[in-house]
Image (tube, rainbow, N blue to C red):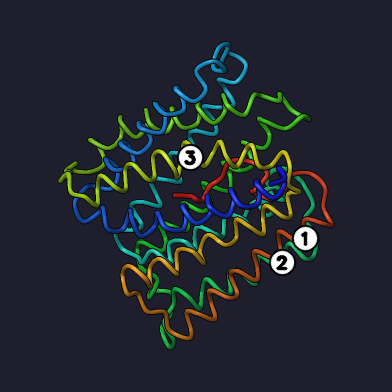
Amino acid sequence: MSRSLKAHVLLVLVTAVWGGTFVLVKQALQDASALLLNTLRMTLASAALILMFRGRLRGLRKSFGPGVLVGLFLYAGYEFQTSGLRFTSPSKSAFITGLSVVLVPVIMAVGFHRRASFWTWAGVLLAFCGLFLMTVPAGQGWSAINRGDLLTLACAVAFAFQIIFVGRATSHESSACPYEQIAFLQTATAAVLMAISFPLLETPHVLWSRAVVTAVLVTGLLGTAAAFTIQAWAQQFLPATHTALILVLEPVFTWIASYTFMGEKVGSRSAVGAGLILGGILLGELVGARRESGISAPGAHPPTFPAT
């Protein structure tokens, strides 16, 4: 198997893991508080990354600042996402989180004076139309958007900034910090912040059920530690547009997992909205990316959204 084909296969598997974790976390939240669950996940991932990269984590001084900055946004993204899952469905959470893909060029244009193409802006508009259809029932106003949807939208913004600053930290044009160090530092920073904040922001509780143990192991080892490493390796052999196309499958996998394991039904209005979001992400990141220089699609660096 060629390295390019192997990279494609591994990225599809990573995307499937990220999509499935929305359902795992949703189920685990019945037995554990949201922020404590995140702390357990990030602590396990940090320990795993130390073991994975123990020979490459020496001399962190150069990477410390950029890695901590990325970790701040990673922390915010996961906290908003997991908290939002208490009030919204896994499929809605996945699709709204996916907006971070098209938020990247918007933030770059507004905050970093990087011009976005017409196709990128068209993708953003299409995705937000889809968001409206998916979260607002017919005949109701914006009041129909629930608390979980808003928390997840904040998560998408945080992940967009995380994507941007990972790119700035690891690109050749900037400080070119080793990706292994950035992966570890962002995860460790998020773990420390979560450990400090969860006793202050919630009443922590955990019942060590099968759902909780499975969620911590899968999200910590596969969805965070292994996924960050695999994605960083795979991007050495794949164009950014190919990676974006693969990663956009994440909400599709979430939808499949929600239907298979939770029996979640999606109406025609929501299905149209989901299609518009996917279309907007594809339009903005595939067509738009071909007409722009600068930051690549999120697949060029460890995410997100995975997010989860």
Residue ID for mark 1: 288
Lower sequence index among marks 2 and 1: 2
Spatial separation of the CA atoms under disc 1 and disc 3: 26 Å
Please report the residue visible at 42 percent of the width from the left and 61 percent of the height from the top: 150
Relative image position of residue 51 (x, y in whole percent): 44, 22
Spatial separation of the CA atoms under disc 3 and disc 2: 26 Å
State whether residue 135 is above or below residue 207. below
Crowd class of label 3 (few under 14; some 14 to 19; many from 20; radius 10 Å): many
Label 3 secondary element? helix
Q: CB of mark 1 within 8 Å of CB of mark 3?
A: no
Which kind of residue does numbered mark 3 sit on? Leu
Please report the residue visible at 35 percent of the width from the left and 74 percent of the height from the top: 264
Relative image position of residue 269 (x, y in whole percent): 48, 84
Which kind of residue does numbered mark 1 sit on? Gly
Residue ID for mark 3: 74
Q: CB of mark 2 within 8 Å of CB of mark 1?
A: yes
State whether residue 121 is above or below residue 154. below
Label 2 secondary element? helix
Which kind of residue does numbered mark 2 sit on? Leu
Relative image position of residue 259 (x, y in whole percent): 38, 73
Label 1 secondary element? helix
Q: Is residue 21 left or right of residue 273?
A: left
Residue ID for mark 2: 283
Lower sequence index among marks 1 and 3: 3
Please report the residue visible at 35 percent of the width from the left and 68 percent of the height from the top: 146
- Where is residue 194, by image quadrant? top left
Closer to us: 8 or 262:
8
